Amino acid sequence: MGGMTGKTGGGKKGDKAGDRDVDASGGGTPGFARRFLALAGGYWHGRSRVTVWALTVALFVLTVGQVSVPVLINLWSERLFDALEQRSMDRFLTMIGLVGLIILYNIVIVVLHLRVKRRLQMGWRDWLTRKLLEDWLRRGRHHQIAYMPGEHDNPDGRIAEDIRITAEMAIDLGHSLTYCALLLISFTNILWMLSGTLSVTLLGTELSVPGHLLFVALLYAAMGTTIAMLIGQPLVTAVNRRQGYEADFRFALARIRENGQTIALLHGESAERGHLSGLFGGVVRGWTGQTRALSHMMVFSASYSVLSAAFPILVAAPRYIAGTITLGVLMQTAQAFQQTVGALSWPIDNLPRVAEWRASVERVLNLHDALVRLDRDVCNVPDGHIQLVRADEHATLTFRGVGIDEPNGTAVVHPFDLEVRPGDRVLIGGDATATIRLFRAVAGVWPWGRGQITLPAHTRVFFMPERPYLPHASLRAVLAYPGAASSVGDGQAADALAGVGLPDLVGRLDDPDHWDEVLSVPERQRLGFARLLIRRPDWIFLEDATDSLDPPAEEELLSLMERELPHATLLTIGHHAALGAHHSRRLVLERTNGAVTLREEGREVRPVAESAA
């Protein structure tokens, strides 16, 4: 076995995560559109791309069908008002029949469009959710990312709510933009033809201006859009701030639900109410800020919408009064003008929704970027993280030059060498922070540091944390976690529960419940040992797994483990004096001068460099 000590040399440290906001390729910060397409655009290139593209094309075709409805109504209104002006009952009845057909056509288009759009929205959300969940719930990333700086807090809200908004609103906004673009193309042609030629005398010269109403509509919409963009700019910031406050409030509520029993035992309701009140105050401030920004926007929108209804008739009316156009052409012109301006006013109408959508996309992108930085800056740098290796030729657990750091690069444990042979029973004590970091490093979820940890290949490893995770499922599923519930038989479960002192739970194997609330902390720790008996691993890592048990219960469970798993290798983090009788070796992590060195009681300590030599 190699010697163990801390050498003051720290090895190469990577840059702090989050110091630079760069993309996965290592370049500078890309634009918003590029970042969004890089994350979400893969939906159109995945395994289901044929179906996805078919749905996309169908959505576009149906959008064209939607645009044809106002065009048909525009043509219909000309003939209707001409029939009214001529007092023709036959033509009037014909118009009634035609509008019925237009209604049926519109119903078919709208229903089909809704179904295709919603299928595309859910498909995209499903793909994006699975992609982010795969990146987040992989090799401890969900745990590691909590230690990284940056704007990626509350990942649950980002995955559940912000991805929903990202996918649904992107397609909604994309559809409405496409609809307005097609509408603009259609009614630009109609308005050009209806405008005729306007004669203008300028400096004694008569000029002919074809399609003058189109130019008036373009100028009118451009002025309105410019004013709206200037007034609505603060709305983006207000929406983003409000969503952050809402996410913090939701997360705090979820934390109370998860820790309800502990809060009740401590009578902490008053403190929690105060905390929630403060967080909800942020929600109120966010709502008020958004209301203020919306109010400024609505002042303009209210004026603009009324003026848009009256303005086209006022512009076209002189030609009707002069007798150069019929009433039908006047109404058709007014409608064409309104549709053109409406299409050009897409930014005004959708600015609040674009602001909300972009805020959600930024929250999703920030989470994704943090995961990319974690992989690139920590996990994929050969000398920049602790490497965990499974090797066929190794029968031992070996640590070679392993040093453990905090995510910011601060040294926690000086580099050391260590070898644990099969069958060893090792107790690890000393500095609490360092022991937990060491436990996490062996589990592969604490990559910050350097060196290599090698575990034997093809061996079963079991990590038991201080508080076992108990999913909201049947007791059988809890015992089998993370395996399938069907892998645990009745007899196997009954023996394990009885062995750890929980025979009363045998009759509830298939009862789903919130076991983390139903069971006391000592009972949960006993249940962790029941899992251990079912899994029967070769290597066992216990992290303060008996700290809530009284001494007789602790002795009972440790003796049970020795009887049932006599050949298993055991590494225990714990500080109870009674643990020493069940372990043959003791490691101590001692803090000196701000960092921790590892030593083994009863063995000579040599520096790593001397050992390697």
Image (cartoon, grey):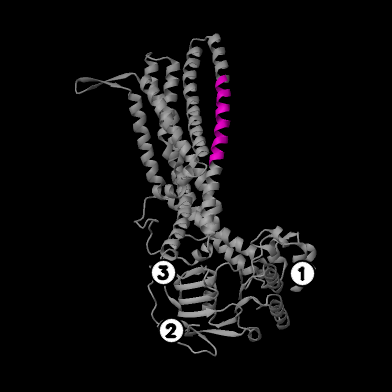
**Is most of the magenta stretch helix, strand or loop?**
helix
In the rendered picture of this protein, how many numbered marks are placed on residues? 3
Label 2 – label 1 distance at C-alpha: 47 Å
Q: Which residue is mark 2?
A: 611
Where is residue 301? Give x, y as percent.
45, 39
Where is residue 18? Give x, y as percent.
41, 63
Work out whether mark 2 precedes mark 1 in sequence or the reverse, and give the earlier one: 1
Q: Amino acid at mark 2?
A: Ser
Q: Which residue is mark 3?
A: 384
Label 1 – label 3 distance at C-alpha: 46 Å
Q: Tell me where the magenta segment starts and ends, as one range.
A: 101-120
In the image, 270 versus 113, the foreground residue is 113
In the image, 414 versus 390, the foreground residue is 390
Q: Amino acid at mark 3?
A: Gly
Q: Is residue 283 visible?
A: no
Quadrant in which residue 487 is drawn: bottom right
